Image (spheres, rainbow, N blue to C red):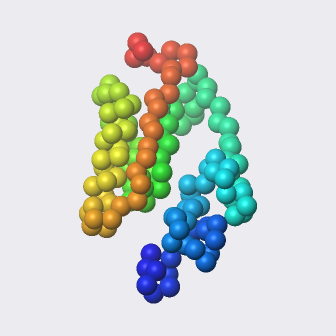
Amino acid sequence: DDPQHGVEPARVYRDLGQRSSGPGLAMSRCLGDLDDADAGIVPTPDVRYYELSPQVPRDGQRDLFLVLASDGVWEHLSDEEVVRLVSRFHASGQPASVACTNLMASAAMCWRREEGNYRDDITALVAYLPCIGSCGRGE
C-alpha cells in the first residue's frame, strides 16, 4: 500500500475520480454488502456443507470447534497455529470466548512484531461444536 508511488490495495471504488471521499471496499469484506452492486460487487457467499457424524472418522480425529476469522487473523497465523492455540483451550476446559480472546491477542502480537504500528482488522469467532452422541467428557 503506497499511494504516493502509484501502488494501492486491491479495492473497488464507487467513483475512481473521488477515491478520497471514502474508503474503497476491500474484496475480502464484501459479504452481504448489498449497497455496492452498482460497483460490481456480488455479495452472495460461497456456501459449503460439511456433515458432522457421531462416529470417529478413520483418521481418529473428531471435529471439536469452528473458527471464523478475518484476514487480520490469517495474515500472520497459519491454520495449524490457530488449531493448536484453540485446541489447548478446548482441551483444558476453557470456554470458547477465552480461546477467541487469546486467538485475537496472538494475531495482534504477530502484527506488532511483523508490521510495527500497522495492523489490519482482527475479527474472530470460536465456537465449540456440541457433542454428537456421547462425547466422553460428561458435557
Q: Quadrant of residue 108?
A: bottom left
| Residue drawn where x is 30% and y is 49% of the image | 106
Residue 80 visible (yes or no): no
As drawn, 110 above or below 124: below
| Residue drawn where x is 47% and y is 56% of the image | 71
Question: Is 62 or 13 nearer to us in this picture?
Answer: 13
Question: Is 84 or 71 nearer to us in this picture?
Answer: 71
Answer left or right for 53 relative to 88.
Answer: right
Answer left or right for 88 relative to 50.
Answer: left
Query: Across the whole image, how many numbered discs are drawn on residues?
Result: 0
Percent x, y of residue 3: 46, 80
Q: Quadrant of the C terminus?
A: top left
Answer left or right for 124 relative to 38.
Answer: left
Percent x, y of residue 33: 63, 51
| Residue drawn where x is 35% and y is 44% of the image | 103
As drawn, 98 above or below 110: above
Residue 95 visible (yes or no): yes
Q: Quadrant of the N terminus?
A: bottom left
Question: Is 50 or 72 nearer to us in this picture?
Answer: 72
Percent x, y of residue 92: 30, 28
Q: Quadrant of residue 72?
A: bottom left
As drawn, 120 above or below 21: above
Residue that extends furthest to the bottom in the rendered view of this protein? 5
Residue that extends furthest to the top in the rendered view of this protein? 138
Percent x, y of residue 111: 32, 60
| Residue drawn where x is 72% and y is 57% of the image | 37
